[in-house]
Amino acid sequence: MVIGGCRRRTSSPILVGREAELRALLDGAMRSPSVLMLEGEAGVGKTRLATELLACAELAGRPVLTAACQPLREPFPYGVVFDALKDVRPARELNPVTGVLAPYLPELAAFLPQPPPRPGDPRAGRHQLFRAVRELLGSLGPHVLLIEDLHWADDGSRRLLRFLMTEPPAGLTLLVTYRREETPGGIPLGSAYRPTPGTAHTLVTLRPLDRDGVQAQVSALLGEANVSAEFAARLHERTAGIPFVVEEIVHAIGGVEGAVHADGATARRLLDTVEVPALLREATVERLMALPPVSRRITDAAAVLGTPSTSDLLAAVAALTPNAPAARSCSRSNATSSWNPAKAGTASGTRSPGKPRTAPSQVPIARNCTGGPHGCCATASRNPWCGWPNTAGRRATGPVP
């Protein structure tokens, strides 16, 4: 399939239903300078979409500089930007201000001029460093700078990227990916960014796949054209349409004969008994462990109860006072939430046996509960990576909706 000159790799099973998003990013990249912002929750396919964009024929020949932020306790200031620049090889004489980069980029020492005098004011020194990065990028001609996982960036990198976005050099296409719910205050760059005249700006938000998208992804993963709608519907319910989760579960059940042709009841039984893939279990535990202690107790309480509950009941089970802020913020009712706290405990080993599963439409923890004072839902909301037996083989009994 060809989209605006981009040849989709039909042998690749992961990217499904992203034609409009890919076209929007490509349209933005074809204007220069440009800023592309790609946001979406964990596992929704940001990296894959960025990879597809860079493979487009229209961008052939453009150098690509790429780096990813890491979830470090104390990230190195500006580290992700310097990681992206370390392999740059300028083709022309550089502005003298770029000499200040020598201590940060020893790989470029042979290409950099002598550094100018260091200003006495640290703020002037920072501005000089930012200008140096912009001048270095401006020497490269048309190119792409891809920074992934901006939500883990240090404050210095955010300020530097905002500086570049505000007045980008000619030829730069800056693409950043991030999870908005995990950025400080929900602001990816630390403070509001407003595109300046002359700079193309594109914001793309990736959503989970719908049922048809899940069906198409399963078909591509297994090379099986006749995936039943009932199986796709059950899988969509259990994975919330997150492509990474769909892929891991399909790999886990791929050897079960006729699984993807199953009717609703058979698909339900199959998904009830499949082992939790290790990557999903680890991802779930990691996100739960990132919560503050009070919020983890609330989440554990919801998992143990396994049914929609009031704030008073959650607080009682979590051994909190009924009026505790975490209890109030984490027990808002929302019938459309697709994150299931009753399932979250399964992957992490916290749910008691014998508790019935809870349908996504019955979940008490709200999708909109993202601003609680303890951050309990900021990292856990819409987390579908759960609902299967834990490593000990323990699983819920009773009816499955």
Image (cartoon, rainbow, N blue to C red):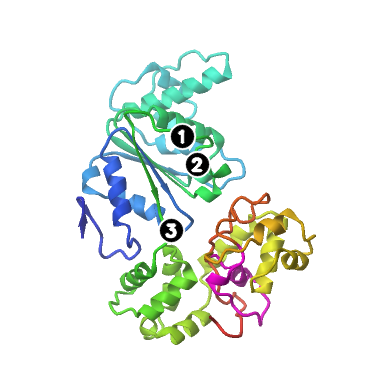
Mark 1 vs 2: CB contact within 8 A: yes
Q: Nearer the viewer, mark 1 or mark 3?
A: 1
Quarter occupied by the N terminus: bottom left
Amino acid type indicated by mark 3: Val
Q: Looking at the image, which residue is at 41% across and 83% down?
A: 256
Mark 1 vs 3: CB contact within 8 A: no
Q: Nearer the viewer, residue 298 or 161?
A: 298
Magenta-highlighted residues? 339-365
Q: Earlier in the sequence, mark 2 or mark 3?
A: 3
Distance from Cα at disc 2 to Cα at disc 3: 18 Å
Residue 320: in sight, yes or no? yes
Mark carried by residue 204? none
Residue 363 on image: x %, y %: 58, 68
**Which residue bears the numbered disc 3?**
44
Q: Nearer the viewer, mark 1 or mark 2?
A: 1
As drawn, 73 above or below 108: below
Which quadrant of the figure has residue 337? bottom right
Residue 105: in sight, yes or no? no
**Which residue bears the numbered disc 1?**
193
**Which residue bears the numbered disc 2?**
188
Which quadrant of the figure has residue 255? bottom left
Q: Nearer the viewer, residue 184 or 130?
A: 184
